[in-house]
Amino acid sequence: MEAGNISALSEFFLSGLTDDPQLQPLLFVLFLFIYVLTAVGNLGLLTLIVISPRLHTPMYFFLSNLSFLDFCYSSVTVPKLLMGFFSGYQIISFFGCMAQLSFFVLFAATEFFFLASMAYDRYVAVCNPLLYHNIMSPRLCLQLVAASYTVGLVEMVFLTTATFNLNFCHPHVITHYFCDFLPLLKLSCSDTHVIQLFLFIFSSFNVSVSLTIVLVSYICIFFAIIRIPSAQGKHKAFSTCASHLTAVSLYYGTTVFMYLRPSSEYSLARDRMVSVFYTVVIPMLNPMIYSLRNKDVKETFWNVLDKASRFLSIPTPRAS
């Protein structure tokens, strides 16, 4: 965008989730509670994995990166939302909006390929257990994480630059609680067909490539599980994948609904509610999904708590 346009457009107004002043204090408390849970859950799980040698495996390496990503993903949108509830100040600067959209694209696109990498990791663990540590070497794990961020970075630069080179019409009111593509494109006075096409192409690429990896991995896992003779062995193999399947279903379901529809079906009011689920709720749920049924994580948590309580001389009850 030219300098003249930047000086003419210095800020946007966010409509937020509601303009009802009676609801805002309640929503502030609710979303603050969710954000605290998200931060404690994701950063706590990340800390457990880092400090426990028992969890220094490829699966937990990816899980620690996902926890960091989910915390960042939530932090892109929720603090600004909370500020709006608390102060009623729903204004975001042009460059603040640009930064928010940039990081949103980076983390959203990267998560698709993190989930795909985790599916491949589960495939190797179930189908090639004897070669697991040879195949999932530290070098390959780092390459998969780096490749995921690279895809997100490329999409961030291309889509954000294209979006903020548009001309925007008055009033500059974004019908959303954060700077997202669809409400921003609604404000544009320019022809947005090309950007909408590229947004659809990138979204389709993210979903189709990553989902293909997930589906192929789990088809192979399914056939490997049904060949296991014992019911206990089948249950153990399936339990290693159940949490990941739940996370995949939640994330893919909501993002596909948001970005892979004809533009005629967009409803900004309804889409705000859907956005809350994948930007606020899912980052809170992921550490619970991956840890509540995970024996290693629970045992590590109680061991760390025991050591801390002994250091502080405080008796700590063990989980049953």
Image: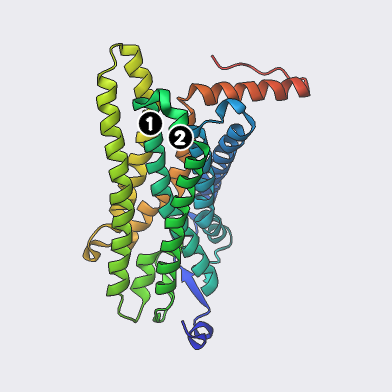
Left or right side of 127 for 261: left
- Front position in the image: 100 or 150: 150
Mark 1 touches mark 2? (CB < 8 Å): yes
- Front position in the image: 60 or 146: 146
Point 33% across, 81% down: residue: 190
Amino acid type indicated by mark 2: Met
- Front position in the image: 38 or 154: 154
Amino acid type indicated by mark 1: Val
- Front position in the image: 150 or 52: 150
Q: Tell me residue 187's x, y (percent).
A: 37, 75
Q: Tell me residue 248's x, y (percent).
A: 35, 40
Residue 19 seen in this snapshot: no
Point 50% across, 60% down: residue: 103
Where disc 1 sits, the SS reads helix
| Total numbered badges shown on the rendered structure | 2
Residue 136 disc label: 2
Give the labeled residue for mark 1.
124
**Quadrant location of residue 182?**
bottom left
Assess disc 1: are there few (<14), some (14-19) or many (≥20) residues with their C-alpha within 10 Å of its C-alpha. many
Residue 87 seen in this snapshot: yes
Q: Tell me residue 262's x, y (percent).
A: 22, 62
Point 38% across, 31% down: residue: 124
Q: Cα distance, mark 1 to mark 2?
A: 8 Å
Q: Earlier in the sequence, mark 1 or mark 2?
A: 1
Q: Considering the image in quadrants, where does the C terminus appear? A: top right
User: In this rendering, is residue 201 above or below 148?
Assistant: below
**Given the current orientation, which residue lies at the most extreme bottom position?**
4
User: In this rendering, is residue 79 above or below 164?
Assistant: above
